[in-house]
Image (spheres, rainbow, N blue to C red):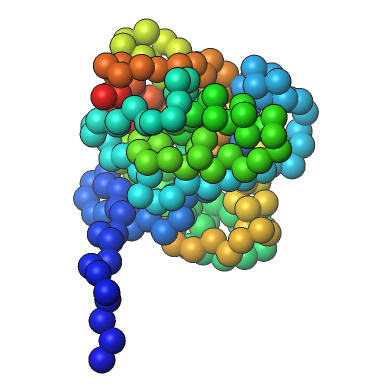
Amino acid sequence: MSSYVFAPPVPVAVAVRGGGLFAVRRVFCVGRNYAGHAREMGGDPSREPPFFFSKPADALVLDGAAMAYPPATGNLHHEVELVVAIGQGGAEIAEETALAHVFGYAVGLDMTRRDVQDEAKAARRPWDMAKGFDASAPIGEIAPASEIGHPAAGEIGLEVNGAARQRGDLADQTWPVAGIIAALSRLVTLKAGDLIFTGTPEGVGPVVPGDELVGRIAGVGEVRTRII
């Protein structure tokens, strides 16, 4: 009888509001899904097709836990985002039925080594080490869609040490949640346990050790972390 050569990793799970755990399979992210952020990153704010990148599931930092400042960067940026938790998988999902695949929503932070990302862009290299490093994805508890519905509008923002850094509205997303799910499911087969970070509004900027970050989305919840 075969056995593992070492103990398998502990499954990654996010708390669900009201009880229970959401076991995480994969973490997808959408780039430049708000026109303001596209402009501040030097991009075209027109409605181009959504593009995606990934983070490893074990990059998640659960709500309230501290996040270590990563090595190999001198310019760590915050990006507050609505996170979609997939409860029913599928491929080639129609936009009209996409929301039926959603279990719930959370507030997340897509932490970015901006200097590493800029170097990768200039050299036309992958962004993996700019986006998918250890502890790069703090996330709050998941609010079930059965309780909060499917938020399509409402303030999204982030404070650093109590001062506002990012402010926007979910209604400003270039691609709403249903469109994101439909587009992503044409590239990969989604399954229960997948998370999708849906992009950030303008106002991204650097953080340093000692900073306290609080991200909030009206009707969804919040995420808190401290940089150490």
Query: Percent from the top left, x then y, of residue 107?
Result: 40, 34
Quarter holding the N terminus? Answer: bottom left
Residue 213 in view (yes/no): yes
Up the image or down, 106 lies above or below 96; here it is: above
Up the image or down, 201 lies above or below 9; here it is: above
Q: Residue at x 64, y 17 (%)?
A: 40
Residue placed most toward the observer, 228 or 99 = 228
Residue 74 in which image quadrant? top left
- Left or right, 219 with respect to 200, comes to left
Q: Residue at x 41, y 10 (%)?
A: 164
Up the image or down, 150 lies above or below 205; here it is: below
Query: Percent from the top left, x then y, of residue 193?
Result: 41, 58
Query: Percent from the top left, x then y, of residue 225?
Result: 29, 27
Quarter holding the C terminus? Answer: top left
Residue placed most toward the observer, 214 or 112 = 112
Q: Residue at x 32, y 10 (%)?
A: 162
- Residue found at the far top of this picture: 163
- Left or right, 30 with respect to 39, comes to left
